[in-house]
Amino acid sequence: MLRRATTVLALLCAAALLTGCSTIEQLARDASGRGSAEPAEACLLRGAEPDPSPTPAPTLDPHVAGEVREAVTAVRKLAGVDTVRESMSNSRTASDDPDRPDCRVVSNHFSSQVDVVMEAAATPAQAAAVPTTMAQHLAWTGVSLALTVPAGPGHIETTVHYSRTFDQTIPIETSTDVAEGLARLAATPHVTSVEASIPYTMRVDYGSLTVLVDGADPATLDAVRTVIGTTAFADTTLHGSFSNGAKP
């Protein structure tokens, strides 16, 4: 029995490998007005690793935490939203203390992940409202969003990741262009999967788009590429290969 190979069309930009100019530690420091090591430890000896679950547990700056809660609450009220889940994580690292040669300073690196699932019948305009609304309530790049529109009549499921983009205004025009492009691809014949990532710069052409297609014939691939050319992802560099390693 012949099994049809899946062709992967991936839109990737090398600049997307640049993960940002600031660490979460610096972002937390900027947001709170103080260092992210809370509380400061008397001395962590050289060679020792920080306790991953200290007591009391470090907490995110209350103002920033409040912004995250406000953003999540606002998104839950939007039309077309089905579920919203937010999770906060913290990783701890240690670095040399320049003032105390025998000690290391412990820093907390906070981040928040927001997962939003729309209703299957949600429109691109409704999906676009999610990142734009979040940006209106946030001023911290420690937040990332995964926005999913489930499969429904005439279209497959799509997911877009907004990675640490929430220290800036996200114009509704930009988020709508992204949502409309994904919706167009989701309704394209032979396309079986669509996933995109928007980098912290909000430069869509610096992000990525991965499209799975259920055929490898040139006509199908050309048709999908034509649709991509009509979307916000048109200027993103195209990479990919057939199952035998040949380039499309």
Image: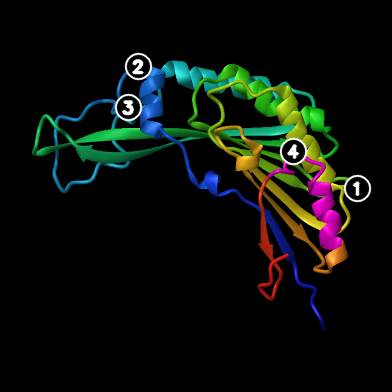
Residue 154's disc number: 1
Labels 4 and 3: the sequence-earlier one: 3
Residue 237 appears at what percent x and percent y? 66, 50
Q: Which stretch is magenta?
A: 220-235
Q: Residues within 10 Å of mark 2 (few under 14, many from 20)?
A: few
Which residue in the protein does label 3 denote? 36
Residue 10's disc number: none
Outermost residue on the bottom side: it is 1
Q: Are marks 3 and 1 in contact (CB under 8 Å)?
A: no
Q: CA distance from mark 1 to mark 4?
A: 21 Å
Q: CA distance from mark 4 to mark 2?
A: 37 Å
**Residue at 67% across, 61% down:** 240
| Quadrant in the picture for the N terminus | bottom right
Quadrant of residue 50 within the rendered picture: top left
Residue 33's disc number: 2
Name the element at disc 2. Answer: loop
3 w.r.t. 79: above or below: below
**Residue at 81% across, 61% down:** 221
Labels 1 and 4: the sequence-earlier one: 1
Q: Are marks 4 and 3 in contact (CB under 8 Å)?
A: no
Residue type of the residue flagged with mark 2: Gly
Name the element at disc 3. Answer: loop
Q: Is residue 164 magenta?
A: no
Labels 1 and 2: the sequence-earlier one: 2
- 1 and 172: which is toward the camera: 172
Left or right: residue 234 versus residue 184 is: left
Left or right: residue 58 versus residue 133 is: left
Labels 4 and 2: the sequence-earlier one: 2
- 223 and 57: which is toward the camera: 223
Q: Is residue 80 visible?
A: no
Which residue in the protein does label 4 denote? 232
Quadrant of residue 130 within the rendered picture: top right
